[in-house]
Amino acid sequence: MSFEFNLLKQGEGSERLGLIKTARGDIETPAFMPVGTLATVKAMTPEELTGLGAKIILGNTYHLYLRPGHELIRELGGLHKFMNWDKPILTDSGGFQVFSLGKLRKISEEGVEFRSHLDGSKHFLTPEKAIEIQLALGSDIMMVLDECTPYPATREYTEDSLSLTTRWARRCKDVPRGEANALFGIVQGGMFPDLRKRSAGEIVDIGFDGYAVGGLSVGEETQVMYDMLDSCVDLLPEDSPRYLMGVGTPENLVECVARGVDIFDCVMPTRNARNGSLFTKRGKLAIKNLCYRDDPLPPEEGCGCYTCSNYSRAYLRHLYMSREILSSRLNTIHNLYYYIHLMEDMRRAISEGNFDKFRKEFHENME
Amino acid sequence: MSFEFNLLKQGEGSERLGLIKTARGDIETPAFMPVGTLATVKAMTPEELTGLGAKIILGNTYHLYLRPGHELIRELGGLHKFMNWDKPILTDSGGFQVFSLGKLRKISEEGVEFRSHLDGSKHFLTPEKAIEIQLALGSDIMMVLDECTPYPATREYTEDSLSLTTRWARRCKDVPRGEANALFGIVQGGMFPDLRKRSAGEIVDIGFDGYAVGGLSVGEETQVMYDMLDSCVDLLPEDSPRYLMGVGTPENLVECVARGVDIFDCVMPTRNARNGSLFTKRGKLAIKNLCYRDDPLPPEEGCGCYTCSNYSRAYLRHLYMSREILSSRLNTIHNLYYYIHLMEDMRRAISEGNFDKFRKEFHENME
């Protein structure tokens, strides 16, 4: 396999410094992956993402399967060429979106039947199909199809669900794939620590290039999420990357790095940006607030991003209130810069052996 | 005055090559000004505009007066600083937008009362106020307040209207302004060649740094627009720049350069871009058309713009159908590149003495 993970340093706690190697480039971890749902990280060009320091992005299989279709993307040379991004892409399996459809889907041993949220057309997603789609896209890191256990769920439902996820994981692994297509397993188990452990054990037994923890940040209390992570992360092999799916706030990232997570993805920096919410070291800033009407300061003083280097809160508020496209662009640049540099700061802290100090100061700065 | 116009070359026909000098930079003419209505050329950053070759942009006084307000922009250091654009800005007077409000405005000798299209609030715009607002914005080239004669209009209405425009032009000129704030007069006269001549004579008599032809492209046949231009352009001083307001299609630009116009502005390249309409040497391309679904070609083969260099029609169609922000960005880049490079091509043709050949081939290429 051309996929490799090197654990560069284990911190004093669970935090760790690593390096993922892929055929399309390396990723220092802990790392954050911007979300590029529909073959575009919303409002950004690939060059801008590279300029912000992004080394890998996430593509959503469910969305790309429906629009423009994985076969079309394959014909046109794959997702990388289609969207002009030559660095690694991790694709999810489509499972999370399908399970979010609620009444529009029906689950069985074989797979999951669902109706498109776009036109109501009927589709059937199996573990094999999920891999086939991701191979058509040309994914560098593919995810197994799992059932994202709903929240809340009974113990019985959660047990059945994690077992299904295990069986589906095995089927995904059995699909032939290329050397350049890494495959990650996913740990489920709901909000039951022992079921999280059981799922982790089963998934690790099958053996994957990396391991994700799924089914968190689905409505539970933050502390419960941390506890669930704690319950299973030690069971994941030290020499494989750990990916916490769909998480989270800056606070979450710091706390989950502290618990040994290596990679993250979340729509929060990009979606919040479009809604006028900017991340800063002191917390979120709602740019529409009247107090910024004539504020000549940048969103965050001292921030080195393009937006903060060139524009005032007053201008950003004006763009937001006027619904200008540039509003989404400038806010997204700032938020992605914030997220990506937060990861960089954490890597430096781990490297220098003062992650605990970093973590403490990070929380103290938040208002 | 720091404003200067040098006529570099008079072609064999009416076409001409010129150079406008301002305190904030030079503009080779014939030139096209991208429209930045609300302190942003929609979807673009200033650096992108510079990269596309834009040397000057237009700001809309009416829109900026209402939102975020000219006083706020003045407090924040002027429009250039506010929007991070350090090259020249031409501002219109707000008249065109006010007169477009129809029943929401009431005209008198003193000025024009109107209601905001945003919140219905009442405002009164006079010639003096129009200049005051443009000075607050820090405009490099200001426009006098004129009445954009409606179309169609009777001869009587048009005569009264052009006389009012003349009286208002005189009042605008009487407002003290800085050395760096050039002021252009505007020729009206509706669709009556002799009234166009009369207006041109009166406006030139007052004396301005440059002369605009207004009230065209308001619904009349294209040939009528060309005839109106022909009727008055020779009366404008050879050593002053000529600006045709709000025009137009690529064909219009070529035909009006042939008639001696130096600068243009139009929302067409930016607005059409957002609506998925791309300009090419062979005509317009509607990117949503099904035939582009799997088309691996760029919008225009041989085009050197960022969009054509990196993306396929299939990808652009996908972005457009998915309503992605990147769709507006990539389409705008292409269309502005097309417009700005069309002007560059015309300047080269004039410079090389083969504008007639260029003009003929340009029209032949259009399908």
Image (tube, coloured by chain):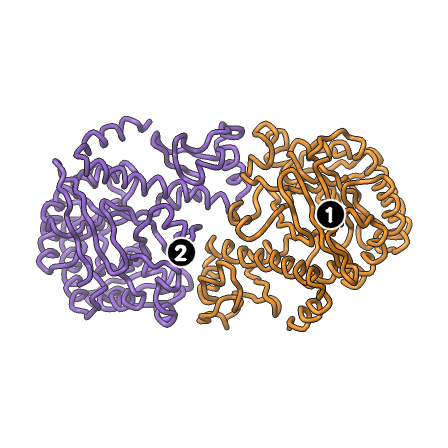
Chain colours: A orange, B purple
* Direction from residue A69 to residue A242 in the image, left or right: right
Residue pictured at 10% horizontal, 51% vertical: B237
State if disc 1 and disc 2 touch (CB < 8 Å): no
The numbered disc on residue A6 is 1
Marks 2 and 1 belong to one chain: no
State whether residue B271 appears in this view: yes
**Residue B248 picture location, percent across and down:** 29, 42
Q: Which of A283 and A149 is in front in this view?
A: A283
**Residue B127 picture location, percent across and down:** 22, 65
**Residue B111 picture location, percent across and down:** 23, 65
Image quadrant occupied by the C terminus of chain B = top left
**Residue A4 picture location, percent across and down:** 72, 42
Q: What residue does disc 2 label?
A: B40
Q: Is B322 located above or below residue B128 in the figure?
A: above
Q: Which amino acid does label 1 sit on?
A: Asn
Chain of residue at mark 1: A
Residue pictured at 54% horizontal, 37% vertical: B318
Q: What residue type is labelled 2?
A: Thr
Q: Nearer the viewer, residue B324 or A5?
A: A5
Secondary structure beneath label 1: strand
Residue pictured at 63% horizontal, 46% vertical: A56
Chain of residue at mark 2: B
Q: Nearer the viewer, residue B179 or B220?
A: B179
Secondary structure beneath label 2: loop
* Direction from residue A80 to residue A194 in the image, left or right: right
Residue pictured at 42% horizontal, 51% vertical: B42
State whether residue A217 appears in this view: no
Q: Nearer the viewer, mark 2 or mark 1?
A: 1
Q: How far apart are marks 2 and 1 (CA)?
A: 46 Å
Disc count in the image? 2
